[in-house]
Amino acid sequence: MKNLYKIGGKIIEINSIYEEVHTLCKDYVCGQTPDFKVETSQSDIEYEREKSAAEDRKEGLPIRNFPDSYLETLEVYRKIAENLLAYDTVLFHGSAVAVDGFGYLFTAKSGTGKSTHTRLWREYFGKRAVMVNDDKPLLQITENGVLVHGTPWDGKHHLSSNISVPLKAICILTRSEENHIERISKSTAYPLLLQQTNRPQNFLKMQKTLEILDRISDNIALYKLGCNMEIEAAETAYNAMKG
């Protein structure tokens, strides 16, 4: 099964075994000449199965039994992300929301409340706020700054839009009884930013990933937010990050 999609600003031909990835990407269909192609095999799917099992073992959890069709969607995105490195684009784990056409990206360790916080932004700003991607957006460094792209891989709540907007800031989210936000240095933010960026096993691709992340960190304002998950947290964050 194959079709063409525009993801991260590039036309991609996806050739898959199962239909699920095409259902996932249906809002991104585009009939132009592809910039590159990705194709999966059963061995790719088995790689994803073992990777998932290794993560479960590391966390001391029961081994999850995912269907092949779902594992293939993960492998497709992995291949897309590695191809997009050539276009100065990385896959990043976070929740990105746009207000008045500018993107704000929140990242943190799993379970901290990224999705909850961006939901507060949508409640606070109403129609001014648009969800870009709630789980795995793409970040692209350009001559005019950094773009954040929506993608079909948008988390368990399936919150995303097929849009690309200039990224205003990246914020590391923490829990706190009182809302407070501060600008932080690249050296402070970088370890967590690296942890939340897709990291290829190939040495040269990893080297390219680090180069792109360095440039993004140099061109984007970086913040740390302590928030209590009340709607005032959205106001506190926006007032500091809007510049």
Image: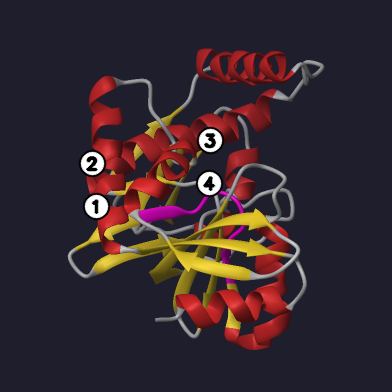
Q: Amino acid at mark 2?
A: Glu
* Residue 151 position (above or below residue 117): above
Q: Earlier in the sequence, mark 4 or mark 1?
A: 4
Quick check: marks 4 and 3 in contact, CB under 8 Å? no
Quick check: marks 4 and 1 in contact, CB under 8 Å? no
Q: How many marks?
A: 4
Mark number displayed over residue 211: 2
Density class for disc 3 (Cα within 10 Å; few <14, some 14-19, many ≥20) is few
Q: Which residues are magenta?
A: 131-139
* Residue 185 position (above or below residue 131): above
Counting from the top left corner in percent of width and height, residue 111 is at 72, 45
In the structure shown, which secondary structural element does the residue marked by tag 3 occupy? loop
Mark number displayed over residue 215: 1
Q: Earlier in the sequence, mark 3 or mark 1?
A: 3
Determine which residue is flagged by label 4. Answer: 93
The answer to which image quadrant residue 119 occupies is bottom right
* Residue 139 position (above or below residue 228): above
